[in-house]
Image (cartoon, rainbow, N blue to C red):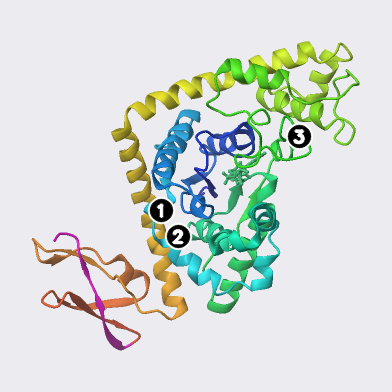
Amino acid sequence: MTMRRVFSGIQPTADSFHLGNYLGAVRQWVDLQDSRDAIYSVVDMHAITMPYDPETLRRRTKVAAAQLFAAGLDPERCILFAQSQVPEHAELCWILSCLTGFGEANRMTQFKDKSAKGGAEASSVGLFTYPILQAADILLYHADEVPVGEDQRQHLELSRTLAQRFNHRFGKTFTVPAPYILPAVSKITDLQDPTAKMSKSSSSPQGIIDLLDEPAAIRRKINRAVTDAESVVRVDDDAKPGVTNLLRIYAALSGDPAGDIAARYGDAGYGGFKKDLGNLVADTFAPIRERTAKLLDDGDTLDRLLADGARRAGAIAKQTMAEVRDKCGFPPAILAFYSERSRLFGHCPRLLICNRTLLANHTDRGTIQYSRAGNVSEAPVFPLEA
Ligand code: AQP
């Protein structure tokens, strides 16, 4: 039986992932490697929807990949790649954009929240179409499931709608993806504002725990986390959002049920509870932090791992796009590669996929002739070597 496929992405928008990213996404990614056909991406094209600095983005993309490998992603058991190294994401995004209603895109709450901060005039069109690029990310790989936090549920619903719409208009092409959301960790909140999600871009330094924080900083932040005046450790989302958030983090990292942890500390105050939780988070993150530093010291290996991931992801994406382009009515733009030195064409996987038959190699003018459904046509070929 073939394994179900998962796809998920994470933005390199900070110098470290945070506890919410870790529990809501990264840890699931690691766990799912054994039971799923897993494809993950550092989505650097999403990271340019807000103003950014190219050198910072380059560095953060590597730091993101290093953290993911350090957290347990294994290139033997999953594919991890940088989104911008597989150009088909942008190509499919355009096609899906043409299937998305303006009003439909305008209902996305993440755009409303993020654009409200800087003002709609200052927001980029890329920020507006972000969920369509996300749909392209997912649909390119025919993902069955998408492990994400609760904040991504609405975007995932759009991906499902676009897959169904494309299939309805052009014939069955895409898998309709399902969200994979674990409620207990789907919204880790800000330690200083426990009603808001912990977020790279909007949490204050005291409200966010970074995966790469020093152990002392982690303990201090948890010690100063906002709680309440009651001094009883128990789950109550409405009356005790701060303590409930800390209990959820404790339960997720220890594996113990939140009720058992609450019973252990009872009404003895928050001091001991926070101290133990601080140690637990610090101990969980310390080895990831050390492994990340080692991986970053060996930049060549990291580059090689990402390039290999892009090669493997790109092979799947190219197959999908060959079918999509054909269904949309586009002629094939890149049908085959050939080597100038050998003057021989290489494999033509796109020809096979789209029921085209190779008739002739016109190496003199850099094209090939093919037939499709009895019609003869010509397409450009791009040399691998200059
Ligand atoms: N607080 C959170 N609790 C649980 N899951 C979370 N995720 C993010 N915050 C929480 C999940 O982490 C994955 C990667 O997120 P992302 O980097 O693509 O962007 P995001 O969701 O917008 O997260 P941030 O931290 O708020 O980033 P910025 O500030 O750059 O926008 C996703 O699966 C997300 O659900």
Q: Residues within 10 Å of mark 2 (few under 14, many from 20)?
A: many
Q: Nearer the viewer, residue 374 or 299?
A: 299
Between discs 3 and 1, the one toward the N terminus = 1
| Magenta stretch secondary structure, dominant | strand
Q: Position of residue 192 (x, y in %)?
A: 74, 30
Q: Secondary structure at mark 3?
A: loop
**Residue 172 seen:** no
Kindly check if marks 3 and 1 are in contact, taking CB atoms under 8 A apart as contact: no
Q: Nearer the viewer, mark 2 or mark 1?
A: 1
Q: Is residue 45 left or right of residue 85?
A: right
Determine the image quadrant of residue 314.
bottom left
Q: Residue at x 67, y 37 (%)?
A: 198
Which disc, if any, is residue 84? 1
Q: How far apart, in angstroms, are the residues tagged by discs 3 and 1?
A: 34 Å
At label 3, the amino acid type is Asp
60 in relation to 115, above or below: above
State the image quarter where residue 249 is shown: top right
The residue indicated by pointer 2 is: 89
Q: Position of residue 355 (x, y in %)?
A: 35, 76
Stretch of the chain drawn in magenta: 374-386
Horizontal and vertical percent position of residue 266: 87, 15
Q: Which residue is mark 3?
A: 193
Q: Earlier in the sequence, mark 2 or mark 1?
A: 1
| Residue 354 placement: quadrant | bottom left
User: Which element is circle 1 on?
Assistant: helix
Magenta residue check for 70: no
